[in-house]
Image (cartoon, rainbow, N blue to C red):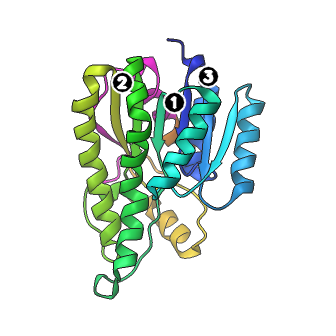
Amino acid sequence: MADATRVAFVTGAGRNIGRAIALALARQGCDVVVNGRSDRKVCDDVAAEVIALGRRALVLMGDVGRPDAVAGMAKEALATFGRIQIVVNNAAIRPQKPFLEMTDDDWHRVLDTDLNSAFYTARAFGAGMVEAGWGRIVNLTGMNAMHGYSGRAPVSVAKHGLWGLTKSLAKELGPNGVTTNAISPGPIDTEHADAAMTAHIREQKSRIPVGRLGTPDDIAALTAFLCSNAGGFINGQMIASNGGAQT
């Protein structure tokens, strides 16, 4: 199957790493479903960039932390393209709050977005991948999947869980030609609504042996490789793309 025939569903694709992944997959010959939760304009802009690269694009707005929203988007995506062979679970939230002040809603909102969403998307599209005998699932984890963070307990729990899901799906779906991998980005130079978070990331440069922060394109290039035929023997792995930063 040629890469040009494939269709990718990328969550959180309106900005930063998600946008870069959508464009990298388009350059690789994929049509792209651009998912976002609230900012339709940035998703439309990414779709326009995909189309400018000669590929088809579909914008689907919806909260991937809700199973009904994912089911609805899956129905529309499959009606438009007929298949989804690549799923990239990038959407995430990383709120900071002391554990002892955390409410049930605080906890479940993070787990729904950062972990349960990957279950919903893999369930929605995995059967089609198995039937076709080819598929790629890539989950974005981060350093939270390796150790905990003060003030971000549910983020660490969700990302650890995503790593567990990755390993399980790799064994269960791998015999049907579907690989599942995780990428753990290090400090990536991106813009955040929280200026303090942006500043914190940029302060990490001194910890990185290669002497620079990562870029969204660094993560996108790795994602594109894992989603290609050349990446087909990589399965059940969590690959750190962090310039050698110690975790």
Secondary element type, mark 2: helix
Is residue 235 a member of the stretch shown in magenta? yes
Is residue 189 a member of the stretch shown in magenta? no
In primary-sequence order, the first of circles 2 and 1 is: 1
Instruction: Give the magenta-colored segment's residue range.
Output: 221-247
Categorize mark 3 by other alpha carbons within 10 Å: few (<14), some (14-19), many (20+).
some
In primary-sequence order, the first of circles 2 and 3 is: 3
Q: Residue 139 at x, y = what percent?
A: 39, 44
Count of numbered marks: 3
Front tag of 3 and 1:
1
Relative to 40, say whether 23 is above or below.
Answer: above
Relative to 54, say whether 205 is above or below.
Answer: below
The residue carrying mark 1 is 84
Relative to 105, say whether 94 is above or below.
Answer: above
Q: Residue 109 at x, y = what percent?
A: 42, 69
Q: Which residue extends farthest bottom? A: 101
Secondary element type, mark 3: loop
Q: Residue 102 at x, y = what percent?
A: 34, 83
The residue carrying mark 2 is 130
Residue 232 in sight: yes
The reply to whether callout 2 and callout 1 are in contact (CB within 8 Å) is no
Secondary element type, mark 1: loop
The residue carrying mark 3 is 29
